[in-house]
């Protein structure tokens, strides 16, 4: 099993317009249970008003940024299910 480091999480959050506020470690109260979780608290970066009135950029990997219908050959399945 692999786990991302807090710095990697912070880098990912920053790439998506968020700022990491805190990382809380949550361990099991039972001594024989070695499970441990990390709770990451993040907040949107404050946006500066845009005099042009345009919305900010959409992340490149956001599915909502795709404004097209799937294309398929008649008789075949669509490229991705919806």
Image (spheres, rainbow, N blue to C red):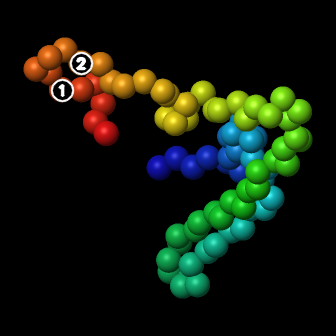
Q: Residue furthest left?
A: 75
Please tell me whether residue 45 is drawn above or below residue 21 in the rendered image: above
Which of the 4 quarters of the picture holds residue 26?
bottom right
Task: Pinpoint residue 11: horizontal percent, then vertical percent.
Answer: 73, 39
Q: Which residue is mark 1?
A: 77
Please tell me whether residue 19 is drawn above or below residue 55 in the rendered image: below
Residue at image position (61%, 46%) is: 4
Please tell me whether residue 57 is drawn above or below residue 5 in the rendered image: above
Task: Pinpoint residue 50: horizontal percent, then vertical percent.
Answer: 86, 35
Q: Residue furthest bottom?
A: 30
Residue 11 visible in image? no
Which numbered disc, 1 or 2, marks the residue that appears first in the sequence?
A: 2
In three-dimensional space, the C-alpha distance between marks 1 and 2, rounded to whole angstroms, equals 7 Å
Query: Mark 2: few, some, or many residues within 10 Å (few <14, many ≥20)?
Result: few
Q: Which residue is mark 2?
A: 72
Do residues under tags 1 and 2 come within 8 Å of each other at their CB atoms? yes
């Amino acid at each position: 099993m692999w786990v991302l480091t807090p710095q990697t999480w912070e880098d990912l959050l920053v790439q998506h317009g968020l700022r990491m506020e805190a990382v809380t470690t949550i361990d099991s109260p039972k001594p024989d249970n070695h499970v441990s979780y990390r709770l990451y608290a993040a907040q949107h970066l404050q946006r500066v008003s845009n005099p042009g009135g345009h919305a900010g950029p959409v992340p490149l990997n956001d599915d909502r940024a795709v404004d097209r219908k799937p294309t398929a050959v008649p008789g075949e399945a669509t490229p991705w299910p919806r």
